Image (tube, grey):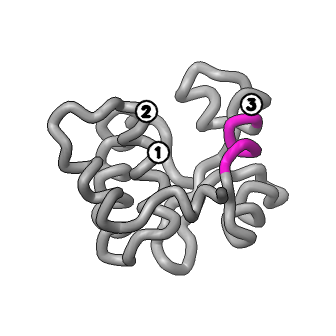
């Protein structure tokens, strides 16, 4: 079963609303919603992610924004902010189920991550 087929909108929203959900499961659902959820929910989650990034990693700034307003980060700067090596960050990225558009952003010449 592909990652896309693991959830549907109703079950994903139930997990998000559960008061004692496991953090790993919650993160998986958020990732699914960011990829396959309706645009209105994607926007809410991206706005929350942007706010959390600014609060907890104020030194990390987007290299640029996509045409639809999504931030794109430099892998080297992301690794530095997270206290990881670039290889560790690239390994995490490579394990993600990505759309062709996301893959192109990760593999860009400027080594950026969306």
Residue at which label 1 appears: 28
Instruction: Choose top left, top right, bottom left or bottom right for residue 109.
Output: bottom right
Residue at which label 2 appears: 24
- Residue for point 65% across, 52% down: 113
Residue 32 percent across, percent down from the top left: 48, 57
80 vs 100, left or right, is left
- Could you say whether the residue bearing mark 3 is in a helix, strand or loop? helix
Across the whole image, how many numbered discs are drawn on residues?
A: 3
- Could you say whether the residue bearing mark 1 is in a helix, strand or loop? helix
- Residue for point 77% across, 50% down: 111
Q: Do the residues labelled 2 and 3 touch (CB within 8 Å)?
A: no
71 vs 74, left or right, is left
Q: Are marks 1 and 2 in contact (CB under 8 Å)?
A: yes
Viewer-side residue, 78 vs 31: 31
Q: Which of marks 1 and 3 is in front?
A: 1
- Crowd rating for badge 2 (residues with CA inside 10 Å; few <14, some 14–19, many 20+): few
Residue 46 percent across, percent down from the top left: 38, 59
45 vs 24, left or right, is left
- Residue for point 34% across, 57% down: 12
Q: Give the range drawn in magenta.
A: 91-96
- Crowd rating for badge 1 (residues with CA inside 10 Å; few <14, some 14–19, many 20+): some
Q: In this view, does 90 lie above or below 83?
A: below
Using the numbered discs, state the Cα–Cα distance from disc 1 to disc 2 in whole angstroms.
6 Å
Using the numbered discs, state the Cα–Cα distance from disc 1 to disc 3 in whole angstroms.
23 Å
Q: Mainly helix, strand or loop, the magenta region?
A: helix
Q: Residue 86 carries which label?
A: 3
Q: Is residue 4 magenta?
A: no
Mark 1 or mark 3, which has the lower sequence index? 1
């Amino acid at each position: 079963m592909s990652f896309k087929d693991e959830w549907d909108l109703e079950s994903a929203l139930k997990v998000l609303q559960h008061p004692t959900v496991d953090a790993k499961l919650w993160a998986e659902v958020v990732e699914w919603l960011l990829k396959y959820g309706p645009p209105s929910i994607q926007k809410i989650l991206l706005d929350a992610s942007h706010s959390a990034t600014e609060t907890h990693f104020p030194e990390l700034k987007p290299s640029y924004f996509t045409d639809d307003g999504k931030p794109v980060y430099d892998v080297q700067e992301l690794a530095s902010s997270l206290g990881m090596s670039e290889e560790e960050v690239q390994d995490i990225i490579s394990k993600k189920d990505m759309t062709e558009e996301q893959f192109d952003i990760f593999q860009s010449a400027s080594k950026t991550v969306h």
